[in-house]
Structures are given as C-alpha cells and as structure tokens.
Amino acid sequence: MKYHPEALEPIVTFLRDIGIGVEFGPGAQNGFLPGVNIHAGVIHVDPETLVGSGDLLHEAGHIAIMPRRFHAQLGSDLEADTHRVIAQEVGEGIPSDPILAAPLQQGELMAQAWSYAAALHIGVPPACVFFPGSYKHHEYEGQHPMERWIESGSHFGLRALATVGMTGYAGLFALMGADNTLPPFPVMSRWVQD
C-alpha cells in the first residue's frame, strides 16, 4: 500500500463497528479501485494491491448512504447497482423520497464528504482519502483539491448528506438558511442509512 498503511486497521475497525463488513483476501481483485472490491455489500480488501487505505472509506461511503435493505445487493459497480436496486423498488426516474433520490443524483459527492467526515471521526488524516491520483487529481500543490472543496463548505456532498438527515447543514448551505437541527458537518448524526 502506497498511501497511509497505518490508517488501514482503524478504518477496518470503524467500518465493522458501524455494520459494514470487511474481508481480506482474493475477493478484492477486479474492483473499481485497485485492492478493493465489493461483493454483496461487503468490502473485500487486499492490502498488497490497495493504493490508499482511504479507498476503503470512500467505497464504504457509497454503501453507507444507501438504506440498509439494499446493502446485500451492492457489488463492484456501485453506480449501476444503486440505480438498479432503487428502480426495482420505486420504478425508473428520480424518486420523491430524498433518501433514495440523493444517492442516485449525488452518490459520488456524498461518498467523498462521508469519507472525509469518517476520517476525522476515526482520527486518521483526510489525506488517506485524498492522496495524489485520487479523484483524478495527480498533480497539485498543498492540499488535495477535493479535500479543499469539502473544507470550503461549498461541496455538494455536504448538502446531500444533510438533506437525507445524516448530518447538519454546514458552510455555504448553512449560510443560505438551510437547517435540519442536526449538528453541522463534519459531525455525523448517523453513519449508515437505516
């Protein structure tokens, strides 16, 4: 593992504590990211081929923003699986329920914001999620651009997580008057959708 191997153990412990399964071994092959794959809602990891420990947090974020009843139906192609399981339940199109609509429309941004909040909660550096090459940012000076966007308070994942009741509104969205009475991001009121 190239980036933040020391964060792997606390990340795995956290994910298991919130009910997201993690297994080590060959099931990690052929995933969307090197060294990590998802089978039936369980994250499989191979530390030898994993690029950064925070990739587990990001993939877990995709699982966490989905209601638990869907977790066992999520696999390697999280975007396609998200669309499929929601369409099977409510039909094609964007559902009226924000808990189902938000992952369809902003799942990637929600997973980014969720993984940032999780890193802070666990006590590992956000750089374990936002490292060179992650999110297609290979060269930059100082802080990773996605991490900087989240910290600016204008990242749309913050708003989407608050809209579905996982955290409170923060940054620009709080200044615009949005309020759901929950503590503001990055404090999470719940880590996984029920």
Image (tube, rainbow, N blue to C red):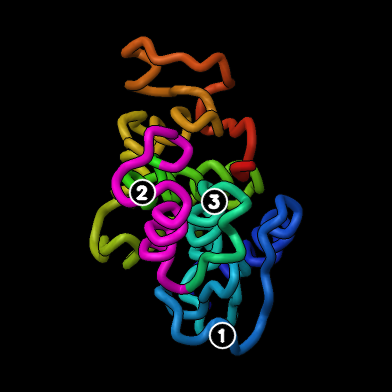
Going from N to C along the chain, the mark reached first, 1 or 2, is 1
Circles 2 and 3 in contact, beta carbons < 8 Å:
no
Residue lying at 63% horizontally and 66% vertically, measured from the top left: 8
Q: Which residue is mark 3?
A: 125
Which secondary structure, mark 2? helix
For residue 23, side relative to residue 49 (left or right):
right
Which secondary structure, mark 3? loop
Q: CA distance from mark 2 to mark 3?
A: 28 Å
Between disc 2 and disc 3, the foreground one is 2
**What secondary structure is the stretch in magenta mostly built from?**
helix
Residue lying at 26% horizontally and 65% vertically, measured from the top left: 138
Residue lying at 41% horizontally and 70% vertically, measured from the top left: 77
Q: CA distance from mark 1 to mark 3?
A: 21 Å
Q: Which residue is mark 1?
A: 48
Circles 1 and 2 in contact, beta carbons < 8 Å:
no
Q: CA distance from mark 1 to mark 2?
A: 32 Å
What range is drawn magenta here? 76-100
Residue lying at 61% horizontally and 65% vertically, measured from the top left: 72
Magenta includes 93?
yes
**Depicted 156 relative to depicted 142: above or below:** above
Q: Position of residue 166 (x, y in %)?
A: 55, 33
Task: Indicate the amino acid at tag 3.
Answer: Pro
Going from N to C along the chain, the mark reached first, 1 or 3, is 1
Residue found at the far top of this picture: 177
Image quarter in which the C terminus is found: top right
Q: Which residue is mark 2?
A: 104
Res 69 label: none
Between disc 1 and disc 3, the foreground one is 1
Task: Indicate the amino acid at tag 2.
Answer: Leu
